[in-house]
Amino acid sequence: MSGRLIVIGLGPGEAIYLTAQALEALACADWFYGYGPYVDRVVAVDDPRRVVSDNREEGARAREALTLAARGECVAMLSGGDPGVFAMASAVCEQIERGPGAWRELSLEIVPGVSAMLAAAAACGAPLGHDFAAISLSDNLKPWPLIERRLLACAGAGLVMAFYNPISKARPWQLGVALEKLREVLSPDTLVIFARAAGRADEQITTTTLDQARADQADMATLVIIGSEETRRVERPGQSSLIYTPRFAPGCDPEAAGSQG
Ligand code: SAH
């Protein structure tokens, strides 16, 4: 079967984040599927090869793209950031597993991209420099009690957390409740980063502490990072402060006197 489906990560926004692999894949596609704003980034609005859909129609979009690829076309499926992080790569795999056997014979390529948490982390230092967890706060595809359990487990394990999908018009309260739950178990001076439009021209990074953090500091284009006990801020004259998490757990500094390295 000659059909191809290429799931392409476009990175967080600016064209500079498109990898050479993504550009190569974009150049060979006959069709471009995806959520409108992502497709807009790389395909002209009047291009007849565009097939845009709402961001809630991921299963149907994946089935349509697979059906077209099975007819021998080269189909690009576009995702923001990395396609494997809360995005289309899993949606496509789900449909391949459930769908007709012919879909398993298709050539499937997944082109990684710079995920929002990586762009956000790079913009403020290295908050993800030690162990961390990426958690979607959307309760569209999982129940809220499960999200709460995971938040508390991560907090208890001392992990830094990167929140995707923190808030939206349809999900207005989830981030506020998450912050409340974390305030019960984490220190009030835990660092919290709101990274809006990371990797875009209008990028905005705000650093605060857990006791000061408010849900209305985030919107759909924001990635929220909750630091661990080790995450720290380093002030720099004339420059924004650096937020980072050391590579080592407490007591394991390889450069500390007496360390075995
Ligand atoms: N696959 C994407 C994530 C899709 S989920 C990735 O790897 O980045 C959508 C969520 O990602 C948004 O609600 C927001 O929390 C986050 N996000 C996507 N792009 C972002 C950006 N440029 N800056 C900050 N957060 C972003």
Image (spheres, rainbow, N blue to C red):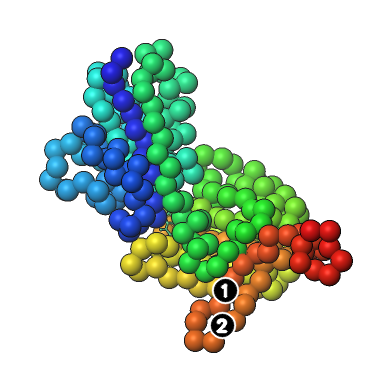
In this picture, residue 198 sits left or right of residue 145: left
Q: How crowded is the residue under tag 2: few (<14 C-alpha within 10 Å), some, or many (20+)?
A: few
Which residue is outermost to the right?
Answer: 258
- Residue 139: give x, y in percent of width and height: 53, 45
**For the point 46% across and 19% down, which residue is it?**
98
Tell me the amino acid under the disc marked 2: Arg
Q: In which quarter of the image is residue 13?
A: bottom left
Where residue 52 sits in the image (x, y, percent)? 26, 40
Asked whether disc 2 touches disc 1, contact meaning CB atoms under 8 Å apart, the reply is yes
The amino acid type, in three-letter code, at marker 1 is Leu
Which structural element holds mark 2? Answer: strand
Where in the figure is residue 159, as x and y percent of width and height?
69, 55
> Which badge, 2 or 1, comes first in the chain's sequence?
2
- For residue 214, above or below residue 177: below
The residue wearing badge 1 is 242
Q: Looking at the picture, tell me which residue is in the foreground, 201 or 181.
A: 201
The residue at 53%/62% (across/down) is: 121
Left/right of residue 229 with respect to residue 136 in the rendered view: right
Q: Residue at coordinates 43% horizontally, 70% vertically from top-left? A: 204
Which quarter of the rendered picture does the C terminus lie within? bottom right
Mark 2 residue CB less than 8 A from any atom of ligand 1: no
In the image, residue 214 sits, relative to residue 85, either above or below, namely below
Quarter of the figure with residue 65: top left
Q: List x then y, in percent, for residue 64.
A: 30, 27
Query: The residue tagged with tag 1: helix, strand or loop?
Result: strand
Above or below: residue 252 compared with residue 5: below
Q: Which residue extends farthest bottom?
A: 237
Q: Which of 219 and 10 is in front in this view?
A: 10
Q: Residue shown at 66%/71% (left/top)?
A: 232
Q: Distance between the residues labelled 2 and 1?
A: 7 Å
Question: Any mark on residue 236, and which?
Answer: 2
